[in-house]
Image: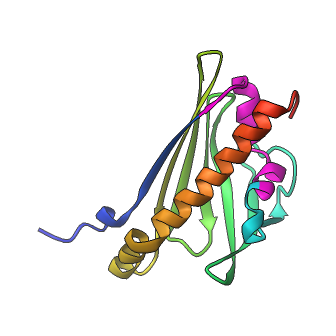
Amino acid sequence: MGFDYTDFMPRIELLTEINAPIEKCFDLARSIDLHMESTKQTGEKAISGKTNGLIGLGETVTWRAKHFGIWQTLTSKITEFDCPNFFVDEMVKGTFKSIRHEHHFSAADGGTLMKDIFVFESPLGILGGWFNQLILTCYMTRLLEERNRVIKKTAEQRTSV
């Protein structure tokens, strides 16, 4: 019987109801420009790969942002894509051991239900697991909630993406 490090792999699930068509919500969720707007508090910028517009299957983007006082870069790739229902971005290079962010969309009551499933693993084994539990899960949840707030506000205000 060994130690299971998957106990330290946080899974964040968020549900956001948006009073807008599913296609609009899907496109806003994959908008590089809107992502930068939602993370302006970290100074996040797309610096390589797809740096503006709508990211699609097989495309990558490299982000540069300041987290915990340290400038970091992270490259993610769209690995799964089913417009307008689902897409996945996964880290291919960065500080984390792994990140997988699933974006699910379904039509609901004349609007859209957007569901995020965000799973990540920090490096450093058990030390990374403790950091996840004590600090990082809450921090990442707040970033995702702000992103979803911006998507919802934008989708409900604008008539086009």
Of 50 and 25, the residue lying toward us:
25
- In the image, residue 114 sits, relative to residue 44, either above or below, namely above
Nearest the eye: 161 or 99: 161
**The N terminus - image quarter:** bottom left
Image side of residue 106 versus residue 10, left or right: right
- Identify the main secondary structure in magenta: helix
Residue in view at x 71 percent, y 34 percent: 26
Where 9 falls versus 118 (above or below)? below
Going 67% across and 45% down the picture, which residue do you hit?
Answer: 149
Task: Examine the structure image and report whether residue 23 is included in the region drawn in magenta.
Answer: yes
Given the current orientation, which residue lies at the most extreme left position?
A: 1
Residue 22 locus on image (x, y percent): 69, 25
Q: Going by the picture, which residue comes out furthest to the top?
A: 110
Q: Is residue 151 left or right of residue 114?
A: right
For the record, the magenta segment spans 17-37
Quadrant hosting residue 157: top right
